[in-house]
Image (cartoon, rainbow, N blue to C red):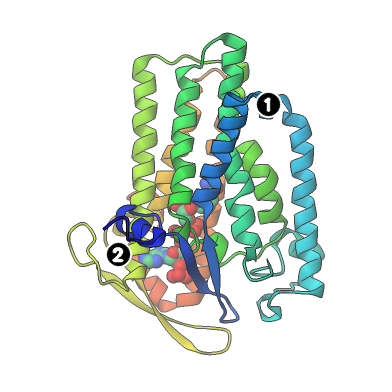
């Protein structure tokens, strides 16, 4: 039976979570539904196979190449980030993909930072948001960590358990992103943000350079954790990942099936909502109050923060630098939570108030 199946059919049947092929995104403010080619997992695998083949089999370059060229690469990443953001700005003014999906605030700097076009594209398939968010920086994330591990081995003759933990936990997070790339089309980045410097520069520079700080720190300060500490970090990281994935999965399942599913073995409870689009059309939606979404309004962020804290704790307690990540992620996700709630409140009006009364906490039940 397997031999007669097409590859997409095989993937749908046997690879839970992986949804390749062409997927539809959310409705844009102008009412357009874009199609996306989902092939991030393939891109990630091909890049890593080529990396291993060239660095470890053919020895065309050293696996430490990224660490060894860290500063020149920073220049290249910045040039790319600024070029992309500037191009996106000019494109918004002179040849937008969809003029109705452009937002001009009248403030040049704000428009440059936060973007004008909602979904800039070149041709039918090259989507700026999906490509820059979901290819160069995030594919590089795991390669950079591998390069840091190789550098540790070169310098000290061994790779510490802390470096392995950082590689494994962040590797799971990156692979999860690609495995669930279709789900990513439903996140705030794709559904609500315009494409400007915030996403263009952020994806090319901020993500690969700041999200990999733990590995960089461990090259200069190798840390060998005691077993209890290492197991504790692993447990926290895996628990955080589990909460992050399950919470996102529950919402995705709920929205995909329009509530006709089971969450924790029961039919989900929800609040019926309505909203108006810019052209005055009335739409209906549902906000789930079951599963993790009944515990807090953004429990997916809580799981993400637990995982982020685990990466930092893997570096021990000698220095503040590796903890930059958890501070940054807390600011990012709390700000995002407030920004999203503000948007949902103006979108759903009194229905949002019913929802917040049913689920009163944002991140931590009983606390915040
Ligand atoms: P969410 O996936 O939480 O999406 C929020 C949207 O979901 C809301 O705008 C609303 O959209 C809808 N929604 C809210 N409550 C409910 C509910 N109860 N039932 C059904 N739908 C609901 O946010 P993000 O897109 O920000 O995050 C996705 C994941 O990505 C998170 O796990 C986050 O941690 C992670 N992330 C990671 C980052 C990183 O740098 N590592 C950066 C940003 C995010 P609608 O208008 O459709 O109702």
- Identify the residue under disc 2: 289
Packing grade of label 2 (10 A; few <14, some 14-19, many >=20) is some
| Residue drawn at (56%, 31%) of the image | 52
Residue 292 in the figure: left or right of residue 52: left
| Mark 1 secondary-structure assignment | loop
Rendered location of residue 186, percent (x, y): 47, 64
Rendered location of residue 320, percent (x, y): 58, 25
Q: Is residue 330 visible?
A: no
- So how many labels did they put on this image? 2
User: Which corner quadrant of the image does residue 288 belong to?
Assistant: bottom left
Extreme-top residue of the structure: 157
Rendered location of residue 314, percent (x, y): 47, 25
User: Which corner quadrant of the image does residue 50 belong to?
Assistant: top right
Tell me the quadrant of the picture where the N terminus can be found: bottom left
- Identify the residue under disc 1: 61
**Please, is residue 42 above or below residue 284 in the view?**
above
């Amino acid at each position: 039976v397997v031999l007669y199946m097409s590859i997409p059919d095989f993937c749908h049947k046997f690879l839970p979570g992986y949804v390749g092929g062409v997927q539809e995104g959310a409705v844009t403010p102008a009412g357009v539904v874009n199609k996306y080619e989902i092939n991030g997992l393939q891109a990630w695998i091909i890049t890593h196979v080529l990396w291993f083949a060239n660095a470890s089999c053919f020895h065309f370059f050293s696996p430490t190449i990224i660490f060894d060229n860290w500063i020149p690469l920073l220049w290249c990443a910045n040039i790319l980030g600024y070029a992309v953001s500037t191009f996106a700005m000019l494109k918004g003014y002179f040849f937008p993909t969809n003029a109705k999906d452009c937002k001009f605030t009248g403030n040049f700097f704000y428009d440059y930072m936060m973007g004008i076009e909602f979904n800039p594209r070149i041709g039918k398939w090259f989507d700026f948001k999906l490509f820059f968010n979901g290819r160069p920086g995030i594919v590089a994330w795991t390669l950079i960590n591998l390069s840091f591990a190789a550098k540790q081995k070169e310098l000290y003759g061994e790779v510490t358990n802390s470096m392995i933990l950082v590689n494994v936990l962040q590797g799971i997070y990156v692979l999860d992103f690609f495995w669930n790339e279709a789900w990513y089309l439903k996140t705030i980045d794709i559904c609500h943000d315009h494409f400007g410097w915030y996403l263009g520069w952020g994806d090319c520079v901020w993500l690969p350079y700041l999200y990999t700080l733990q590995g960089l720190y461990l090259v200069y300060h190798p840390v060998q954790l005691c077993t209890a500490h290492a197991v504790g970090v692993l447990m926290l990281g895996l628990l955080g990942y589990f909460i992050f994935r399950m919470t996102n999965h529950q919402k995705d399942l709920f929205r995909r099936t329009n509530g006709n599913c089971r969450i924790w073995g029961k039919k989900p409870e929800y609040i019926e909502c309505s909203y108006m689009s810019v052209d005055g059309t009335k739409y209906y939606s549902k906000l789930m109050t079951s599963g993790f979404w009944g515990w807090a309004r953004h429990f997916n962020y809580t799981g993400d923060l637990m995982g982020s804290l685990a990466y930092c704790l893997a570096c021990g307690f000698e220095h503040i630098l590796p903890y930059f990540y958890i501070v940054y992620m807390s600011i990012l996700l709390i700000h995002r939570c407030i920004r999203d709630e503000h948007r949902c409140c103006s979108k759903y009006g009194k229905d949002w108030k019913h929802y917040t009364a049913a689920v009163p906490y944002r991140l931590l039940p009983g606390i915040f």
